[in-house]
Image (cartoon, rainbow, N blue to C red):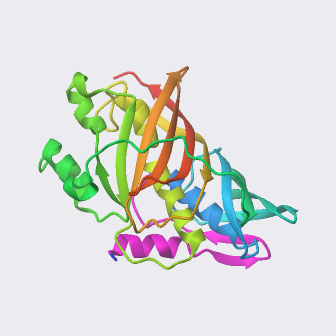
Amino acid sequence: MNESLKELLDLLDLEQIELDIFRGRSPEERIQRVFGGQVAAQALVAAGRTVPDDRSVHSLHAYFIRPGDPAIPIVYNVERVRDGRSFTTRRVVAIQHGKAIFTMSASFHISEEGVEHQASVMPDVPDPETLPTFQERMHGLVGDAPEFRDWLAKPRPVDARYASPLTWEAHRDPELRSARTNVWFRYHAELPDDPLLHVVLAAYASDFTLVDTVLLAHGMAWGASNIVGASLDHAMWFHRPFRTDDWLLYAQESPWAGGARGLARGEMFTASGDLVVSVVQEAMIRVTKP
């Protein structure tokens, strides 16, 4: 387990400061705002700690309201909306400087039998072990450029292997532009069996590449194009148990963009082709003057 993953697991171990009130912190990095996947993951941890062990989260719906300040802790207030016989509902508000920066509703469900089908088919892509890491792909594009050296050298908690073009590659080559992208990812460590932990880690990883699918269709890339973006809302549905220390294929597409907003959706599959998570996100994407 590398240090970045250890730090992430530590960030997800929230401090309980009162009944249904938790406090989380951010990495000690020089970043302008808190990563959205971190806030969503911490909020889900807070909600899960107020739910009986016999119930698993099956969906979440979240709104990013204000940029998070990485210099101060985030307080998560959990509201126990409903405790039913089969379903439990929680609402979480993340607060900084006395204002809400994020809200989330999450629903938990007991294990039940029911009808089953899967219409989605996992895309046919190369095995992850045959693909270069994200850092190797980016190094091939930017080389040893000083402005990228530290960023590429920094360890990451998630091992991501792209089975499709990077936004930087499509920025340079219009023929690579597409509204679809496929990314294998996993956390390279033997993680505990806690089902909530794997769901939380999937929520964290889900926010890394989804908006990039919108940019890929237009040949834009963070740091290479005059764009400003931010996540607006995020929804996830968890269909069956899975592990994030095994490879998951994140198949993503952007069906629409316009009005300074872009919509992206994704599906996470196990290596054997089981659909385990569905994701939808809308983001603000503004093209600024050079």
* Camera sees residue 285: yes
* Residue 208 highlighted magenta (yes or no): no
Task: Kindly indicate the quadrant of the structure image that contains residue 186.
Answer: bottom left
Task: Kindly indicate the quadrant of the structure image that contains residue 6.
Answer: bottom left
Residue 27: image x %, image y %?
A: 45, 66
Residue at 82%, 63% (x, y): give it.
86
* Residue 10 highlighted magenta (yes or no): yes
Residue 177: image x %, image y %?
A: 30, 26
Residue at 47%, 36% (x, y): give it.
229
- Left or right: residue 287 versus residue 164 is right
Task: Kindly indicate the quadrant of the structure image that contains residue 270.
Answer: bottom left
- Left or right: residue 123 versus residue 141 is right
- Quarter of the image where the N terminus is located: bottom left
Residues in magenta? 2-31
Residue at 20%, 48% (x, y): give it.
137
- Left or right: residue 106 versus residue 148 is right
Q: In the depicted view, which residue is nearer to us: 83 or 208?
A: 83
* Camera sees residue 102: no
Residue 119: image x %, image y %?
A: 54, 41
Residue 227: image x %, image y %?
A: 40, 30
